Amino acid sequence: MQRPAFLLMPGFSAIAFFAALEPLRIANRLSGKELYHWTIHAPRGDHAEASNAMQLRTDGPVPDGCDALVVCAGFEPLASASSKLLGQVRRLWRAAVDTGAFVLAEAGILGSETITLHWEAADQFRRRYPHIPVSGELYERHARLFTCAGGTAAMDMMLDRIAFSHGMALATAVSDQLIHDRIRPPGAPQRVSLAEQARRAGPVVQRLIAGMERAVTGQGTLDSILAEEGISRRQAERLFVARLGVAPGRYFREVRIRHALELMRNARMPVHEAALMAGFSSQPVFSRACRQHFGMAPRELLNAGLSRS
C-alpha cells in the first residue's frame, strides 16, 4: 500500500488537488484493494482553504511514515512556508502540484533535475530560482521527484503513476471512469494551440488571425490588419478578450514568436535573423518577448517543442 500525504498550502488549487486525489480513490475501488491510503494536511490549524474559499478538514500533523509528500499550492505558495515546515518538507519531499514547486525550491531540495509548474507562474519561478531548470511539460517525473503544471495535468500525472505501479490496464480503467479520453504524455501542451483557438473564435476573429498570419511574413502591423478588416482597436480588443481571453496585441506577438521559432527550427536560421524576419527589431527584443510571453528564452522554447500548431 502506498501512503501519500497531501500538504495543502493556503490558497491551493482545488481542481488540481482533486484531480490528483480522485484517480487514487478510483484505483482503490476498481482494484478491490486499498492500493493507496492518503492523508490531508495544512501548514497550521485543522482546516485548509482553497483559492475558491472551499475549506477541507485535515488529518493533523504530516506523518513521518508517509511514502510521499505531495505539496499542493496556488497563489502565493510561500505565504505559510515557515522554517519549520520547510524542514519537514526536506525530510519527506517527493511531489509538487501547480505552484508547489516553490515550496520544494525554498526548502533547498531542487537542483539539477528539471521541474514544471503552471505556465502562468513559470517566469516568476525562474527569476527567483535561476539555477533550477524549468520545462513547459504537463508533468516531470524523476526517481524521487514528481512535479506537474496543476489543473487537470495532476490527473495525468497520477494516472501515469498508477500505470507505473499497477499497470496500464488499471490506469486506463481509472481514466475511463473519469471520462478522460486519454492519459496525456508529459510533453502534451499546457495551453490550447493557436490553430485550435482560431477554430473556436468565430468568423471575424478568424479573419483577423488570418491577417496576422499573413502579416508576420510581410512585416505588417496590427493597425494595418485592423484597418483592412474595417475594425477599430477597441472592437478588436472586445472580440479577442471575449473569444480568446487575450488582447489582440498579445495574440499577434505570440504568432510572431512562433513564426520566428519555426524559422529557427525548420530553416536553421540564426536567432537574430529569425527575430528580424518575424518583425522584431532585434534579438534582445525577441528574447525579451519570449520570456515575457512564455517565461523561456528562444532556445528553451525550441527544446520544449513549442510550435505554431
Image (spheres, rainbow, N blue to C red):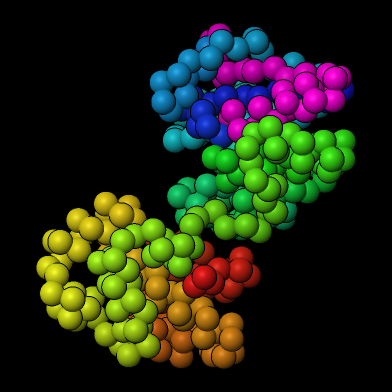
199 is within the stretch colored magenta: no
Badge count = 0
Q: Is residue 234 above or below residue 48?
A: below
The answer to whether residue 145 is seen in the rendering is no
Q: Report x, y in % for residue 291.
A: 45, 64
Position of residue 247 in the picture relative to residue 80 (left or right): left
Q: Report x, y in % for residue 33.
A: 86, 19
Q: Is residue 303 above or below residue 55?
A: below
Q: Quadrant of residue 232?
A: bottom left
19 is within the stretch colored magenta: yes
Q: Nearer the viewer, residue 103 or 192?
A: 192
What residue lies at 64% left-to-right and 34% top-to-bottom?
Answer: 178
Find the magenta span and give its range. 17-46
What residue lies at 64% left-to-right and 41% top-to-bottom?
Answer: 180
Q: Report x, y in % for residue 13.
A: 50, 32
The answer to whether residue 31 is seen in the rendering is yes
> Quadrant location of the N terminus?
top right
